[in-house]
Amino acid sequence: AQTVTQSQPEMSVQEAETVTLSCTYDTSESDYYLFWYKQPPSRQMILVIRQEAYKQQNATENRFSVNFQKAAKSFSLKISDSQLGDAAMYFCAYRSAWISSGSARQLTFGSGTQLTVLP
Amino acid sequence: GAGVSQSPRYKVAKRGQDVALRCDPISGHVSLFWYQQALGQGPEFLTYFQNEAQLDKSGLPSDRFFAERPEGSVSTLKIQRTQQEDSAVYLCASSLTGQGRNQPQHFGDGTRLSIL
């Protein structure tokens, strides 16, 4: 079974500064997807960024980028130029790329990091 | 609507009562997932549907939990004889197909269930 670990329950960053959220995972699979989701108090999970394991290039979406280290099974999220609206709970998630008959495409989530942005 | 819709947004029930939570996925989405999110934790998988077929229910914590999607669109998660440990946010997600290599899951706002 896959596991996802987020070792930072809380992080804070000054507005306009850069912050990095850590995530490690454990899997025996070679092909999979990794995601970062943002969950504000409204509770809706919002996809921030995703990475396909077979791609060596780190994914980037505007101010959000990842540092994907496949051998180390590490997948950190960097938020540049932090904004007040970035404050939320951030979840790292894993999903297998190989779907056998009858099995699901469920996400396995970490326990989350609460990000506070200080004005 | 354009997104995944869940109702009710909040549900309070007394221990022992039965509850039903509804999920309206994005129109045309084949795959539907239910997750349970305890306070301060990440969501945990409960069950998965591909159209009307429940292909995986390995995450359902007990036989008090039951989910259905009879016509392949709206889904209902039912919890019988609720207990305090059932208190959580229940999230529903849908994705376009069950075959694509990289179909993102779109989440609803969840139902916060409180058992007194």
Image (spheres, coloured by chain):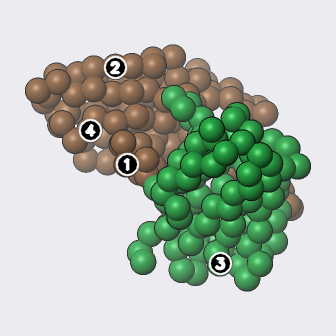
Chain colours: A brown, B green
Say which mark, if any, is on residue B73: 3
Q: Distance between the Cα atoms at labels 3 and 2?
A: 39 Å
Mark 3: secondary structure: loop
**Kind of residue at badge 1:** Ser
The numbered dot on residue A11 is 2
Q: The residue tagged with tag 1: helix, strand or loop?
A: loop
Q: Which residue is denoted by mark 4 in the rendering?
A: A86
Give how far across and how far down residue B101 sits, in percent.
Answer: 63, 61
Mark 4 belongs to chain: A
As drawn, is A12 to the left or to the right of B42? Answer: left
Marks 4/3 in contact by CB < 8 Å: the verdict is no
* Residue at image point 62% right, 29% down: A4
Residue B5 appears in the picture as rendered: yes
Residue under circle 1? Answer: A42
Find out whether the residues at labels 4 and 1 contact each other: C-beta distance under 8 Å.
Answer: no
Q: Quadrant of residue B100?
A: bottom right
- Residue B38's tag is none
Instruction: Assess whether mark 2 and mark 4 are in contact (beta carbons under 8 angstroms).
Output: no
* SS class, disc 4: helix
Contact, mark 3 vs mark 1 (Cβ under 8 Å): no
Confirm whether circles 3 and 2 share one chain: no
Which mark is in front, 4 or 1?
1
How packed mark 3 is, by other alpha carbons closer than 10 Å (few <14, some 14-19, many 20 or more), is: many
Residue type indicated by callout 4:
Asp
Position of residue A9 measured from the top left corner of the image (x, y, whole percent): 45, 19
Residues marked 4 and 2, same chain: yes
Question: Toward which corner of the image does residue B15 lie, by quadrant?
Answer: top right
Which residue does the image show at 67% across and 45% down from the upper left?
B14
Q: Nearer the viewer, mark 2 or mark 1?
A: 1
Label 2 sits on a secondary structure element that is strand
